[in-house]
Image (spheres, grey):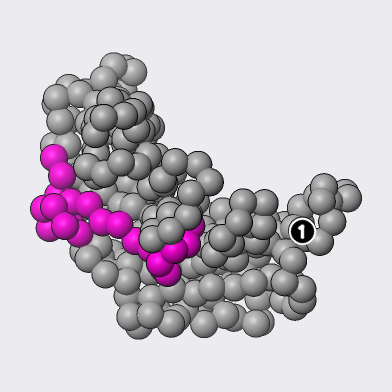
């Protein structure tokens, strides 16, 4: 069993959160044969990195997905990015993945890109869902749903999926709403089904129900399957 968590370390003249990956034996003890114990992963920048999902590939390699953020309420170039790290079964960074075992992904510059869940498709490609926010002012956050696909080696977005490797969707007829992707599954027929939340921000605080359940079907080429449920 693998556990993905984060811990705060002092580095770069301040304290920042880094990935911590632990392998636990069946008896509940830490497996020190995996990287000598808990494995710390640091991107070497003045930002926090916190994992949100972990997947064990068919090859035995361990893929960890998370988010890298600047201090709270800051915008600018890559204000928040999605990050991936891949470890070998022995707990070392996998040099065949990304750059030295790590990758940073931002759909657009000067945005907050946030991941919530990742799955690995049968062909090894990585599908991640979450949301993107372009708002320049705190308190005016209206995220849009995103679904992205990354090549199996983690080095680039899959250009054959949607537009440039990622799909963006705004749920609802008005601009003053937010939509997030929080989970994704792949059906046996290849359809990607993502789930999340939808909420109007026209009135704050919003009246009940505060949030609605949101679901979307996406074909293998990254286009929306409008035969899956009603979409406005």
- Give the dominant element type of the magenta stretch: helix, strand or loop: loop
Q: In this picture, which residue range is highlighted in magenta?
A: 92-112
In the picture of the structure, the residue carrying the numbered disc 1 is: 201
Q: Residue at x 65, y 82 (%)?
A: 226
> In this image, 173 relative to 41: left or right?
right
Give coordinates of residue 3: x percent, y percent: 36, 32
Q: Residue at x 44, y 73 (%)?
A: 166
Q: Residue at x 84, y 56 (%)?
A: 203
Task: Give residue 121's quadrant in the image.
Answer: bottom left
> In this image, 222 relative to 227: left or right?
left
Secondary structure found at label 1:
loop
Decide which of 137, 52 is in the foreground and name it: 137
Give coordinates of residue 195: x percent, y percent: 61, 59
Give coordinates of residue 162: x percent, y percent: 45, 81
Decide which of 160, 122 is in the foreground and name it: 160
Query: Which residue is situated farthest in the left direction here?
Result: 95
> In this image, 183 relative to 18: left or right?
right
Q: Is residue 218 above or below residue 26?
A: below
Q: Quadrant of the C terminus?
A: bottom right
> In this image, 36 relative to 137: left or right?
left
Q: Is residue 86 above or below residue 215?
A: above
Residue 108 drawn in magenta: yes
Decide which of 232, 152 is in the foreground and name it: 232
Give coordinates of residue 36: x percent, y percent: 14, 25
Task: Give residue 197's quadrant in the image.
Answer: bottom right
């Amino acid at each position: 069993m693998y556990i993905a968590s984060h811990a705060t370390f002092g580095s770069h003249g301040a304290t920042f959160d880094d990935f911590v990956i632990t392998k636990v034996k069946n008896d509940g003890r830490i497996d020190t044969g995996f990287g000598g114990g808990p494995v710390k992963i640091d991107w070497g920048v003045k930002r926090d990195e916190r994992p949100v999902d972990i997947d064990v590939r068919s090859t035995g390699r361990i893929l960890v997905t998370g988010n890298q953020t600047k201090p709270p309420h800051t915008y600018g170039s890559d204000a928040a990015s999605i990050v991936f790290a891949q470890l070998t079964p022995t707990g070392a960074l996998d040099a065949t993945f990304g750059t030295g075992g790590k990758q940073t992904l931002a759909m657009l510059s000067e945005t907050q890109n946030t991941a919530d869940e990742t799955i690995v498709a049968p062909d090894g490609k990585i599908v991640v869902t979450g949301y993107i926010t372009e708002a320049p002012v705190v308190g005016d956050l209206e995220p849009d749903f995103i679904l992205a696909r990354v090549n199996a080696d983690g080095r680039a977005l899959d250009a054959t999926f949607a537009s440039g490797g990622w799909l963006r969707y705004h749920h609802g007829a008005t601009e003053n709403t937010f939509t997030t992707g929080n989970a994704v599954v792949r059906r046996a027929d290849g359809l990607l089904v993502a789930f999340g939340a939808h909420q109007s921000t026209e009135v704050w605080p919003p009246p009940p129900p505060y949030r609605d359940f949101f679901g979307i079907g996406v074909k293998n080429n990254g286009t929306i399957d409008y035969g899956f449920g009603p979409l406005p």
